[in-house]
Amino acid sequence: MRAVTRTAPAKINLGLDITGTRADGYHLLETVFQAVSIADTVTVAMTESPEITLTCDVPAVPCSPKNIAWKAAQRYREAAGLQSGVQIQILKRIPMEAGMGGGSTDGAAVLLALQELTGNALPQEKLLEIAVSLGADVPFFLYGGTAYGAGIGEKLEPLPLFSTDCLVIAKGTAGVSTAQAYGAIDALQNPKHPPVQQLRKALEAGGTAAEIAPLCGNLFELAVELEEVQQIRSTMLEQGALCSVMTGSGAAVFGLFPNRESAESACAVLWKQVPFAEVCHTL
């Protein structure tokens, strides 16, 4: 039984804005995705028995058709006309309910692993179509790097890689339901929107972390009111962060720091306050 193991990186949203709602209820967004080095490990094998099986080292992760990785395997099988089963193993390192795309990146990793196992049974357009059907973040994880996203996240444009190893990501004990977060967004009255287009242009011009930081922002910060998020942001800024912004619909927070020393110092302080804090780099 041949297996493929893939690294499934997390993401942060350097900028995230909601620009409207489609007729089918999906929210329209514009964002700048950035892949980071915090990652799950996903191993996929094709089996003679027809079942899809999924295991994970974190008990809270659903090992059932509710999991995006499971759905990815099922939809790939249907699209490619495969009769074989799929065995998926996930080693989870991306925190849950963090806005870091943990489920989405696992789903993308399954799609890419099945492409490798089948010798690219599906054209790239079909793979992207499946990714879009799985969730707004999944298409980005087929490519990674730094990218501008629009629509519901499926309209992607690669940007010059934003390279830094002075990034700290932290998360408290509370999580955020994506559905609840979008509901709170809908209730906002005349919110101040983050300058995603300015951020995009700065990245296209090869902006430094100091130039990028003032343009980073997330509309969800106005909608998701978690004391832990505010505490993490305050700590990062007190420790010298150039900016501190919640990612996705929460509840993880990233901070861009001017150098590695200040990033590691801030991380040490955060470890005393929250269960997850890590210095990482962009991919």
Image (cartoon, rainbow, N blue to C red):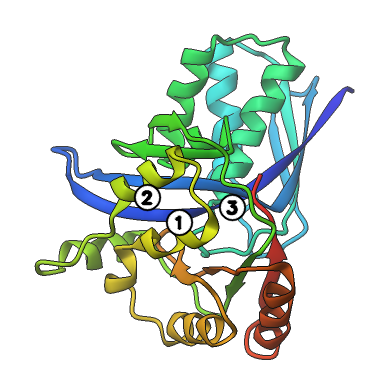
Q: Which residue is mark 1?
A: 212
Residue 280, quarter of picture: bottom right
Return the x and y of residue 129 as percentages of the image width and height.
43, 22
Q: In this orientation, does residue 43 appear?
A: yes
Nearer-the-camera pick, 38 or 266: 266
Q: Which residue is mark 2?
A: 199
Nearer-the-camera pick, 194 or 1: 194
Q: Which residue is mark 3?
A: 102
Image-based side of 29 in relation to 77, left or right: left
Disc 1 + disc 2, Cβ < 8 Å: yes
Amino acid type of the residue tagged 2 in the rendering: Leu
Image-based side of 133 in relation to 18, left or right: right
Which is more foreground, mark 3 or mark 2?
2
Mark 3 and mark 2 lie on one chain; the one further toward the N terminus is 3
Return the x and y of residue 127 as percentages of the image width and height.
52, 20
Which is more foreground, mark 1 or mark 3?
1
**Quadrant, the N terminus:** top right
